[in-house]
């Protein structure tokens, strides 16, 4: 297997993992939003962290290495399913990149935020 083939396989696996995570978040969203609304001090959002293939926070350095852009991430079927689930709840979802580390260079991690209730 050539290095390019390995990169393509890793890219496909990573995108599939991200897609599956969106589906899992969608399945948890109803309960998580209800819990956030009903807590003693109601919370205005629910936050999820996307993970890499090793179960660690998904970093932009990893997605950049495989030419996976934020635009590609939000075009997955799983994200569209999550958006549909959120719309049923009158909740807004979005993916952002949040500062994680500055050593040895700036690194951001991907998060999914649900809010708007």
Image: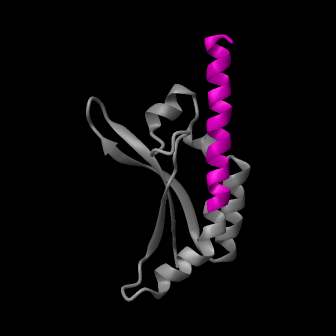
Residue placed furthest toward the front: 54
| 82 and 10: which is toward the camera | 10
Q: Is residue 58 left or right of residue 18?
A: left
- The prevailing secondary structure element of the residues shown in magenta is helix
Does residue 19 belong to the magenta stretch?
A: yes
Q: Position of residue 74 (x, y in %)?
A: 63, 48
Q: Report the residue that reaches farthest toward the top.
A: 2
- Does residue 14 sit above or below 30 in this rendering? above
Give the image location of residue 43, x and y in percent: 41, 78
The answer to whether residue 81 is left or right of residue 56 is: right
Magenta stretch: give its range: 1-24
For residue 116: magenta?
no
Q: Is residue 10 toward the left or the right of residue 50 in the image?
A: right
* Residue located 26% across and 33% down the image: 103
Give the residue displayed 51% in from the left and 26% down from the top: 65
Which image quarter holds the N terminus?
A: top right
Picture coordinates of residue 82 (x, y %)?
66, 61
What residue is at 54 percent from the left and 58 percent from the top? Answer: 94
- Where 89 sits versus 2, above or below? below
Residue 44, compared with residue 94, is above or below; it is: below
Q: Nearer the viewer, residue 99 or 11?
A: 11
Foreground of the two, 36 or 86: 36
Report the coloring of the rendering.
one colour
Instruction: Examine the rendered structure and indicate whether residue 82 appears above or below residue 57.
Output: below
* Residue 27, image quadrant: bottom right
- Please state the total of marks drawn on the protein image: 0
The residue depicted at 61 percent of the width and 69 percent of the height is 28
Residue sitting at the far left: 103
Residue 59 is situated, as x and y percent measured from the top left of the image, at: 45, 39
């Amino acid at each position: 297997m050539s290095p390019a083939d390995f990169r393509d396989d890793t890219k496909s696996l990573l995108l599939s993992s991200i897609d599956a995570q969106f589906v899992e978040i969608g399945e948890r969203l109803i309960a998580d939003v209800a819990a956030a609304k009903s807590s003693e001090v109601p919370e205005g959002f629910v936050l999820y962290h996307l993970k890499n293939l090793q179960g660690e926070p998904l970093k932009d350095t990893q997605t950049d290495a495989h030419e996976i852009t934020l635009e590609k991430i939000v075009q997955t079927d799983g994200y569209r399913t999550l958006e549909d689930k959120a719309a049923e709840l009158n909740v807004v979802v979005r993916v952002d990149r949040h500062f994680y580390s500055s050593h040895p260079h700036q690194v951001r991690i991907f998060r999914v935020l649900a809010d708007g209730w």
